Structures are given as structure tokens and as C-alpha cells.
Amino acid sequence: MTASPARAPLTFIHDALEDLKSKHLHTHLRVLAGEQKPVCVVDGKEVINLASNNYLGLTSHPKLKKAAIEAVRKYGAGSGAVRSIAGTMQIHVDLETQIAKFKNTEACVVFQSGFTANAGTVSAILGKEDLIISDELNHASIIDGSRLSKGTIKVFKHKDMADCERILKDTENWPGKKLLITDGVFSMDGDIADLPALCDLAEKYGCITMIDDAHSSGVLGKNGRGTVDHLNCHGRVDIQVGTLSKAIGVLGGYVCASRELIDYLHHRARPFIFSTSHPPAVVASCQAAFELLDSEVGAKLVKKLWANTAFFKRKLKKLGFKTGASQTPITPILVGEAAKAFEFGRKLFEAGVFAPAIGYPTVAEGKARLRAIVTATHKRADLEKAAQIMGTIGKELGIV
């Protein structure tokens, strides 16, 4: 009896990786040594860091670190259970109350990440009879949550209110619930949703409204209260999702809404029900971050963030770089061809600037770019140096 050939069921993984390498799109995880700071050591090399979401520099703020250490001493290293059984500690409740007050909503629930907050909420409130109307550039977590809901998904052209209304008109008599959902700030382009117009449409056509404020929390609005505050849409958005992992500087996501909706998520949002709650150190440092935000210190940090952003964008514009429709500290440097964008990113890193390339499937094919994010803690000299290096290498590669 002849032996059957050895099975190789994972050959496709090798082939996929080789395909990425052939297109110069294969990357490795760069390793940060020490704290997430504006100038840091990555892969053993000192670089100007334009890659993090640490908008306000809170990841290394002394008050957050002190709060984390004190929480470990008082409450221990972990919570030991899911929220729905024995894992809801008083500090979890206190943080949620604090966030709800900050966001001017009735209630709040904290999730393990911004991704699970989006995906868990959409899939909890909608079912197969329902309809999701979604901006084409919405975050992957919104897309995944929409798919998990098994509802019908209709996508409108990015920030195109006429196209959005066309879909709403076509589905005016939809028998189930309708959810109109958008990012507040779009993570790859840095532009801001036309929230007032979306609220008008939602009210006209009877839609639930939901916004993902991941890149708006701590960035837009008074002391970083987000897009709803920035565009004066209080009371018009049913569900606000935010993150604790970007400007807040720690880890997690949250949903702010009515008390009833939050109570419903306690019973139906699967990531909340089936995941262990945040360790006390994480919760306490988030509390410290919101205390800082809701103070003069927070106001000054947000102001500095925007001043640094304007400074850096002026430099890039003068050098001839295209930054698209960005209205926020997220600054795309448009390249187009993916291989060239990744080469640009590699050469910048070698020269001391960390601004990673982004290609398909994160952005559409032919729209590869570098994504630079300025923070409140960058020094002007470092931003000027980064721009100069970008200009030199951009000319070498024919990008500018």
C-alpha cells in the first residue's frame, strides 16, 4: 500500500506571504523600546514618532502612571471575571459615570476596545430584518459589526449627502429598524463627518444615529468632547462610541447613550457579556485622563495639539505634498502606488522619521499613503526636522 502524500493544508499562507513580498508590501512589527513619546527608540533606532495615536501625550503622563500604580495596590492586578457575573468593580461604574458626564449623555458602558464597542453595539441592536446605512470610509469595526448583525447594508459615497438621501428615499418603507452610522473623524483621511446634515436626514427618515468618535475623543470639541460637541449636535445622536486607547492614552472603548440603551447592551452586547473586565490599573488611569481633559491642563493640551498640527501641515504644503481633505491631526501624505509608499516609509525610517505607509486593504488600491499624526507633545524643531527629511526623500522618489 503506497503512502498518501503529506497534507499541507496551510500552504496558502506561505503563498499569500510570498505574494506580499513580491509586491514589496510585506512588513514586520516594529518594536518600541520605552515609552510612547514624540521622539522614541523603535527597532533600536531613535526616530521622530509620527505613527502613534497618542494625541495628547497622556500615555506617559505622571498622573496616569501614578493612578495605575495606586489602583494595583488597592484593587489588585485584575478583575477576575466578566462584567455580567462578578467583574463589575466600583471603579468600572465610576469611570462610566465620569465619561457619561463628560460626553453629556445619560449613561455609558465601557468595552475592552473601540473595535468591540462598535462591533458589539451594532450587532446587538440590529438583526436580519434591519438596515444599516454606512459611509463608505467607515472603520472596519463598523463594517464587521454590520455584517455580524446580519442586517442589510447600504453604503453611501463618502460624505455625499445626496447619495445618502437617495438610499434613504429608496428604503423609506423599510419594515425593520434603520441605523445611519458614520465615523466622526475618518481614520485614514483625517476629515470630519458632516454630522448636522446626517442628523437632519436621520430625523427626516426615522433612523437611529450612531457615530464612532475614536479619533475625535480628546481632539475635537470643548476639552476634547468629540464631534457631537464640536458640531453642536447634542441630543441629536443616539449612540456615541469613543476610545480610551488614543487621546485618552490607555486602553478600551466606550458607548454613550440613553440609560435604557446601555442597559440593553449589558444584556445583549456579546463582547461585554463574554469578556473579562478591564484591570483596575487601566480603569484608574482612564479616570485620571478624563480628569486632566476636563481641566485647564486638558484645554491647553488640545490647543497645543491643534497649533502643532497647523504648523506641520503648513510645512508639508510648502514642500508640495498632497494631504487630501484632512481637517485634523491625522495627516495623510498621498502617494498612490503602494510599492512607492512603502519605499517612502522605509527610507524615512532609515533617516529618522517614523511615519508608516498604508496600503490596500486598509485604503483602496491606488490610494496608498503615509499617515502622519502630530501630537501635543511634539516640539516644533522635531516637526520641522521631520518635514525637511520628508521633503528630501519625497523629491528623491518623485513624490513632490
Image (cartoon, rainbow, N blue to C red):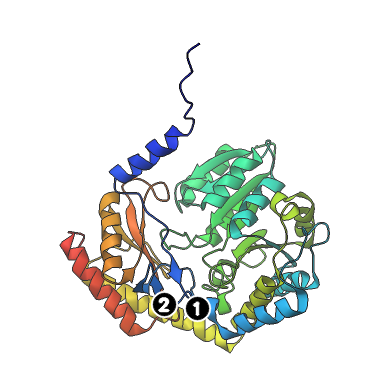
Q: Amino acid at mark 1?
A: Gly
User: In this figure, what is the number of numbered marks?
Assistant: 2
Above-or-below relation of 201 to 4: below
Who comes first in sequence, dot 2 or dot 1? Answer: 2
The front one of 21 and 114 is: 21
Which residue is situated farthest in the top direction here?
A: 1
Residue contact between numbered discs 2 and 1, judged by CB atoms under 8 Å: yes
Taking the image as shown, residue 368 lies to the left or right of residue 33, namely left
Picture quadrant of residue 150: top right
The residue singled out by tag 2 in the image is 38
Above-or-below relation of 66 to 8: below
Q: Is residue 325 visible?
A: yes
Residue 23 on image: x %, y %? 29, 44
| Residue drawn at the location 44% of the way across and 69% of the way down | 32
**Mark 2 secondary-structure assignment:** loop
| Residue drawn at the location 55% of the way across and 46% of the way down | 143
Q: Amino acid at mark 2?
A: Pro
The residue singled out by tag 1 in the image is 57
| Residue drawn at the location 69% of the way across and 52% of the way down | 271
